[in-house]
Amino acid sequence: GLSASAALARRPSITGAELRSAVPLPPPFQVPLPIPSLLKPVSADRYEITQREASAEILPGLKTPLWTYEGTFPGPTIESRRGRPITVTHRNELPVPTVVHLHGGRTPAASDGYPTDLVLPEGWPRATVHHGHGMHDPRAVVTQLTRDYTFPLDQRPTLLWYHDHRMDFTAPAIWRGLAGLHIVRDGAEDSLGLPAGRRELPLVIVDRAFAADGSLDYPALDPTLRERPGVPEPYLAGVLGDVILVNGAPWPVHEADATRYRLRILNASNARHYELEAVTDDGRRLDLVQIGADQGLLATPVTHRLLPIAPAERYDVVVDFSGVPVGSRVRLLNRLGSGRTRDVMAFVVARKAADDSRIPPILSTDLPTWRRTDAVGVREFAFRTGRMRGGHGWLIGGQPFDPARSDVTTRLGDVEVWRLIADVHHPVHLHLVGFRVLSRRGRPPLPHDAGLKDTVSLRPGEAVEIITRFDGYRGRYLFHCHNAEHEDMAMMANLEIV
Ligand code: C2O
Ligand code: CU
């Protein structure tokens, strides 16, 4: 078949071949949009999550086995207040070790979910934990049967998400359902008057493919396949499915008032990029007014007609249905999709209603304003495919991930500029810190690069500069590509803050 990079050259925005489901697919916009339930604390600021197998009727009449947090996909949403620490105890009842990472959290290293800090299932032989790369360093492995993750949440309010992060096995674990939302709020944001309550909707967008028995299809659940010749191409490029799920439902529909809505969008797909547009029945594109990025509110709103969203990115967007005729639809479409992957979900505007929400012209005044001259230095990292141990992998600076190697050491409090260079599409994520995009291809950042981010989409052939300050905590963190298959195929590096 075609090599991954040749496939990419044909269609630069799509990251690989798409799996075809072996079951009949339901028509779009029939299933009501589910809203993930809120997780109740077991006592003040303490939560418990059991990771377990469950099954769900995702496609009508079929049972899909899943790996879940608390039995659902997405997992339950945690809502917390800025600066009020919480502890989440994870118990692993899955058949494999797991790791929990709070994506976008400003978390001390011990609770950040380093890929070898395992939560073992009961009865798992502790002595035989090993990793597919064959580069496993026993000193780096921390194993426990349950784990308390402590999150200080001393950070700007935003939409975070928690997901599996085990070394070499993250992609299939997320694909099978190990992802959930975590919303941080504070009083300043609450008082802005943005759409709230049932007019604030989390939208977790993923693609999946289904086998004939209703189970989720995945090209290779055994990542050691990468060591063999003839690795299936979709696995190398990143896995794409032909079914779009929003909050776990296929192409759902939501009945809306003819008012403003706040959409808190997460692309939790392993590898699929989207360009979202909201299109009315009479072909008009509604404005997508971006109010926030990965790490919270923008300074001022940014209006998009087309909103690109890479894996792991979050966009906080207000859309106004007040001009849409009652009884008609607004479809959320993916301009990068074709056929069934063009549809995402729909809103049916059901009724006129009063709306006292607003979008203030100034959303926040606390965004960091680091300048190049603040930086102690510039580092450069190339995100490129390459040979590793006889097969193909994805490398940063020519190196595959190795938990035993030190890659980047920064000093707490230092500002640095990082220049990130890509061969194909790579959404690059830094743990612990938020950053700002300084430039793309030597030019000013794009409108959707606004605000404080923790994941930036490097498009094919692009060089992107970001600037950040390494503050918060000392310890060992990570940066990596968030195409989950690239991440599993070693596109990850250690970031040590000293
Ligand atoms: Cu969303 Cu290191 O991950
Ligand atoms: Cu990548």
Image (cartoon, rainbow, N blue to C red):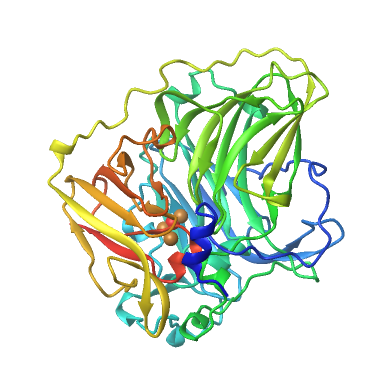
Q: Which residue appears at 35% of the width and 40% of the height?
A: 154
| 132 is higher (above) or lower (below) than 110 | below
Residue 294 rendering spot, x and y as whole percentages: 44, 40
Q: Is residue 170 visible to the viewer in this orientation of the structure?
A: no
Camera-nearest residue between 128 and 207: 207
Q: Is residue 239 visible to the viewer in this orientation of the structure?
A: yes
| 273 is higher (above) or lower (below) than 233 | above
Q: Which residue appears at 33% of the width and 82% of the height?
A: 138
**Rendered-image quarter of ligand 1:** bottom left
Camera-nearest residue between 68 and 438: 438
Which quadrant is the C terminus positioned in? bottom left
Residue 215 rendering spot, x and y as whole percentages: 74, 68
| 393 is higher (above) or lower (below) than 373 | below
Residue 140: name its quadrant.
bottom left
Camera-nearest residue between 80 and 404: 404
Which quadrant is the N terminus positioned in? bottom right
Residue 368 rendering spot, x and y as whole percentages: 27, 32
Left of 445 or right of it: where is 98?
right
Residue 321: name its quadrant.
top right
| 395 is higher (above) or lower (below) than 306 | below
Left of 392 or right of it: where is 315?
right
